[in-house]
């Protein structure tokens, strides 16, 4: 890429000038680079914006006041074009409380024109014939490190330079398919997502392999989980780079195991660091056993005959959704929420109630409720 196509913005004064310039455009492409693969204290390390050329690469580790960026993102008169914006929206909320108004997400748009490969490289290639150079190392780069290399800056700029073009192509295609209102509703839902701090209890219980543990084992796992979080925070390293989940489960399963033979413990398998790990295991063994909340499945309360009827209705409803997806050339999962179909399989006469379910979209009600009502009448 021609180096004139990007500029690193690392002063407050230049940020103000850049935002004053791009805010006059009808739309601005936006992307973020973060450091979660390398750091426990995850943060946004670079914000890329582009109204055309050049791309401006804002360094929030150098700029003291990024609030003007938040003002632009929240300005409903300027459309913000992201690709797969969910993570970025949560990150902006987490770090600065910034919220995005007037969003266009090219990943969602591509899905609703029938694309099956939704990564940025695939979408650009399919819809505007642009083939980005692959940079596997940069995709998992520690964006905290400074100075940023010329290669990294080029990679970051590429993520926004073509979004405006592909946005226009996708918008035209959506209009021709009469689906632009569909994606606009999806965009409106997406901008409302917020960062939610991880719940420690649910995080422990969701660790792969933890379902084999009894109450005592879960107590040990919870203690080990807390230990790992303290170490990760102190070292500023992501959890999996301190001790992997599999090693925690191994220790919770066999708390008296020789630490030197457990894979993944690194220095914690040897003295002196092993002392603190053993203390965490001992703390878990002394704690009250942890009881995993029971999940009551509604169908378990039904008799065998009714369970069979529910299963048959579920298959029919999914078959209907698959047929609609085939007819429209879309992933069936986009067309009606699976949870809603499950509820309808149990209560086929409850469509009026189901249409008010929060996960059912307005466009889905308009497009498919009458057809779905017909299917329900036959099963």
Image (tube, grey):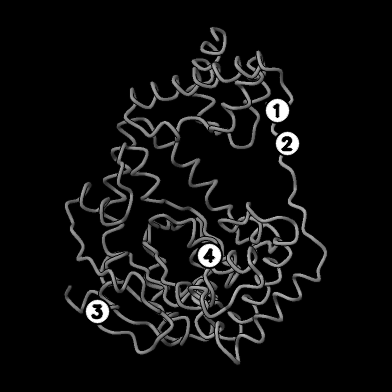
| Residue 257 position by quadrant | bottom right
For marks 4 and 2, give the one nearer the viewer.
4
Label located before the other in sequence (3 or 4): 3
For marks 3 and 2, give the one nearer the viewer.
2
List x then y, in percent, for residue 132: 21, 62
Question: Dot 2 corresponds to which residue?
Answer: 296
Judging from the image, what secondary structure is the residue with disc 1 in? helix
Question: Dot 1 corresponds to which residue?
Answer: 300
List x then y, in percent, for residue 48: 37, 71
Pointer 1 local density, CA inside 10 Å: few below 14, some 14–19, many at least 20: few
Residue ID at (71%, 21%): 302
Residue ID at (70%, 27%): 300
The quarter of the image holding the N terminus is bottom left
Judging from the image, what secondary structure is the residue with disc 2 in? loop
How far apart are the alpha carbons under marks 3 and 4? 35 Å
How far apart are the alpha carbons under marks 4 and 1? 32 Å
Label located before the other in sequence (4 or 2): 4
Judging from the image, what secondary structure is the residue with disc 3 in? helix
Q: Nearer the viewer, residue 145 or 157?
A: 145
Question: Dot 3 corresponds to which residue?
Answer: 151
- For the residues labelled 2 and 1, say whether their Cβ atoms are less than 8 Å apart: yes
Task: Specify the label residue 352 is tagged with.
Answer: none
Q: From what the image shows, is residue 170 above or below residue 149?
A: above
Label located before the other in sequence (4 or 1): 4
For marks 3 and 4, give the one nearer the viewer.
4
Q: Is residue 25 left or right of residue 239?
A: left
Q: Nearer the viewer, residue 351 or 241?
A: 241
Question: Dot 4 corresponds to which residue?
Answer: 246
């Amino acid at each position: 890429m021609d180096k004139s196509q990007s500029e690193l913005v690392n002063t407050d004064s230049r940020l103000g000038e850049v935002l004053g310039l791009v805010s006059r455009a009808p739309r601005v492409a936006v992307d973020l680079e973060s450091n979660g693969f390398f750091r426990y204290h995850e943060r946004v390390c670079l914000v890329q914006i582009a109204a055309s050329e050049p791309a401006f690469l804002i360094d929030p580790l150098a700029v003291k006041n990024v609030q003007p960026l938040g003002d632009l993102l929240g300005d409903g008169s300027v459309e913000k074009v992201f690709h797969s914006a969910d993570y970025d929206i949560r990150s902006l909320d987490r770090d600065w409380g910034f919220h995005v108004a007037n969003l266009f997400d090219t990943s969602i748009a591509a899905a609703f024109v029938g694309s099956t490969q939704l990564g940025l490289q695939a979408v650009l290639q399919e819809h505007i014939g642009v083939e980005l150079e692959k940079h596997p190392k940069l995709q998992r780069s520690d964006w905290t490190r400074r100075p940023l290399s010329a290669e990294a800056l080029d990679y970051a700029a590429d993520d926004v330079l073509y979004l405006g073009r592909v946005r226009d192509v996708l918008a035209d295609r959506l209009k021709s398919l009469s689906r632009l209102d569909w994606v606009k509703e999806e965009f409106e839902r997406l901008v409302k997502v917020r960062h939610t701090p991880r719940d420690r209890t649910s995080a422990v219980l969701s660790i792969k392999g933890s379902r084999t543990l009894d109450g005592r084992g879960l107590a040990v796992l919870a203690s080990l989980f807390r230990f790992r979080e303290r170490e990760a925070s102190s070292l500023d390293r992501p959890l999996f780079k301190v001790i992997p989940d599999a090693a925690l489960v191994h220790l919770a399963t066999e708390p008296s195991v020789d630490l030197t033979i457990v894979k993944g413990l690194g220095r914690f398998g040897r003295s002196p660091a092993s002392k603190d790990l053993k203390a965490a295991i001992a703390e878990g063994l002394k704690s009250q056993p942890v009881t995993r909340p029971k999940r009551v499945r509604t169908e378990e309360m039904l008799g065998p005959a009714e369970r069979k009827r529910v299963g048959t209705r579920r298959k029919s409803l999914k078959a209907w959704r698959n047929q609609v997806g085939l007819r429209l050339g879309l992933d069936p999962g986009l067309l009606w929420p699976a949870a809603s179909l499950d509820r309808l399989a149990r209560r086929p006469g409850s469509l009026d109630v189901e249409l008010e379910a929060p996960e059912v979209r307005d466009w889905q009600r308009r497009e498919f409720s009458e057809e779905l009502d017909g299917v329900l009448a036959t099963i």
